[in-house]
Amino acid sequence: MQKHMLALAACGLTFLPSSLVLADDVKIGSLTISAPYVRAMVPGAPVGGGYMTITNTGDSDDRLVAASSPRAGAVQIHEMKMDNDVMIMRELAGGLAIPAGRTIELKPGGYHLMFMKVAEPFLRGQTIRVTLRFQKAGSTDVDFPVGSIAANKESSHAE
């Protein structure tokens, strides 16, 4: 009986979705980057979106000024917002402010990373390595797990 229970447990663990693996928080200076993820892409799509939460526990403001990834020709920092009942998306040319003592969430429909010129679509279960560059804290590599096409912060790690 015990042998059968161990076999069933092993099978159950074998079939756990890879999205259950949580990315570790990354700390650089007074910044903590948590819950990074990207959405899976449909075949042929040249762009993808990346999301995360950045908390600044320091006494001075910082700024996310650039991002890059070997999986994309370019990575831009974007904002989506409503303007006279029209959703607009634009690159934040000066980067994204991370005020002292605040948490900034990059999420669908708001601030996000836009992966441009992606040659091979991001597939659920993969991990995308991204280098983030901050004005004061410097640069760090962050692994972004790939969730479903409709992933969000809550579902990207619990599907």
Image (cartoon, rainbow, N blue to C red):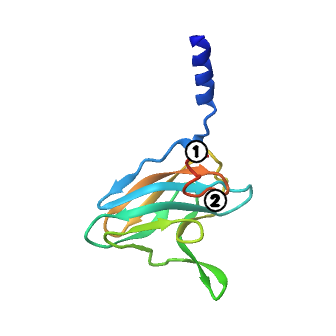
The quarter of the rendered structure image containing the N terminus is top right
Residue 127 location (% of width, % of height): 55, 47
Query: Is label 1 in a helix, a strand or a loop?
Result: helix
Residue 59: quarter of image: bottom left
Outermost residue on the front side: it is 1
Q: Nearer the viewer, residue 79 or 55?
A: 55
Left or right: 146, with 131 as reference point: right
Write the residue at 43% across / 55% down: 34
Label of residue 118 in the image = 2
Marks counted in the figure total 2
For residue 90, above or below residue 74: below
Nearest to N terminus: mark 1 or mark 2: 1
Badge 1 amino acid: Ser
Label of residue 19 in the image = 1
Viewer-nearest of labels 1 and 2? 1
Query: Is label 2 in a helix, a strand or a loop?
Result: loop
Q: Nearer the viewer, residue 122 or 152?
A: 152
For label 1, count other residues whose C-alpha is less than 10 Å away and answer few (under 14), some (14-19) or many (20+): many
Write the residue at 61% across / 39% down: 17
